[in-house]
């Protein structure tokens, strides 16, 4: 009982440390004054300024388009990569590919961003929408592989053997057995890639050109010019949007788990 209470207290402290700055920021986004240390009165002035800022709204749209496109493409490529690694027979080759995949995840963002900048400069790709999209796809693919591969590894080989015994082709096995089983992992990979894309700053900062920007880079630029509660309003909306994504992912995972469970019973 004592251990349980201590763990509860510890978790409460951890969550307070994590969420207190966010709620502090959200609280002052409704401050009629332009300060973050003296709340004058409730106001939606900063939200009004935010939605009247055409440039910032275009940047928000750019960020969402980049995140959705990069997540969708990286999910397709990552799923194909995970299936390919899972199908490999040689354990040594599989371990090498997994190690190369994991290196991209743990490598510092500054190094990755600088590498992309050098590569795009050499190849001749203009910095802007294309360079940011390609960069986000590149660092999202390994994340999708990591999310999908465990679902493939926990899948029993008897499912595939049974499907083949019933006359299913390799394509039918892939589309009607493997993909439905790993759907939760695919969705998890998509939402993780989406979150990383929306959140990324370091890599995007290196590959963003003139005339194109994402929210993370824009917020950084705004913060350097001085404290503006418009940033608080924007951050509040982003935080609420992230919560909606998490809730959506939770219900999709729950629904997919229920469908798989019903299929197993049948």
Image (cartoon, rainbow, N blue to C red):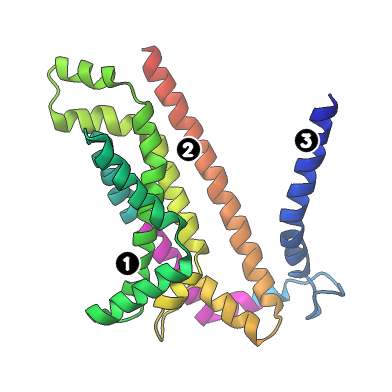
**158 vs 36, nearest the viewer:** 158
- What is the residue that sits farthest to the front in this orientation? 92
- Categorize mark 1 by other alpha carbons within 10 Å: few (<14), some (14-19), many (20+): some
Majority secondary structure in the magenta region? helix
Q: Which residues are magenta?
A: 49-71
- For marks 1 and 3, the one nearer the N-term is 3
**95 vs 24, nearest the viewer:** 95
Residue 134 image label: 1
Q: Residue at x 33, y 73 (%)?
A: 131
Q: Which residue is mark 3?
A: 7
Callout 3: helix, strand or loop?
A: helix
Marks counted in the figure total 3
Q: Which residue is mark 2?
A: 252
Is residue 154 depicted above or below 37 in this figure?
Answer: above
- Report the Cα–Cα distance between label 1 and label 2: 28 Å
Callout 2: helix, strand or loop?
A: helix
Q: Residue at x 27, y 35 (%)?
A: 91
Q: Is residue 60 at least partly visible in the picture?
A: no
């Amino acid at each position: 009982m004592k251990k349980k209470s201590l763990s509860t207290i510890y978790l409460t402290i951890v969550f307070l440390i994590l969420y207190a700055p966010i709620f502090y920021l959200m609280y002052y986004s409704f401050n009629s004054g332009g300060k973050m240390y003296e709340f004058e009165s409730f106001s939606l002035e900063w939200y009004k300024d935010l939605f009247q800022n055409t440039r910032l709204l275009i940047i928000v749209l750019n960020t969402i388009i980049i995140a959705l496109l990069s997540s969708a493409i990286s999910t397709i490529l990552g799923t194909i990569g995970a299936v390919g690694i899972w199908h490999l027979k040689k354990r040594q080759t599989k371990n090498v590919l997994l190690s190369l995949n994991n290196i991209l995840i743990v490598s510092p963002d500054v190094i990755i961003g600088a590498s992309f900048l050098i590569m795009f400069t050499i190849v001749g790709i203009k910095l802007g929408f294309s360079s940011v999209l390609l960069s986000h796809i590149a660092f999202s693919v390994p994340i999708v592989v990591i999310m999908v591969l465990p679902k493939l590894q926990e899948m029993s080989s008897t499912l595939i053997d049974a499907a083949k015994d019933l006359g299913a082709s390799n394509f039918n096995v892939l589309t009607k057995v493997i993909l439905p089983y790993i759907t939760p992992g695919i969705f998890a990979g998509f939402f993780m890639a989406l979150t990383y894309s929306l959140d990324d700053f370091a890599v995007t900062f290196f590959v963003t050109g003139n005339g194109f920007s994402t929210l993370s880079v824009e917020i950084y630029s705004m913060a350097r010019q001085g404290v503006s509660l418009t940033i608080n309003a924007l951050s509040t909306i982003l935080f609420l949007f992230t919560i909606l994504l998490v809730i959506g992912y939770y219900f999709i995972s729950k629904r997919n788990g229920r469908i798989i469970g019903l299929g197993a019973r049948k």
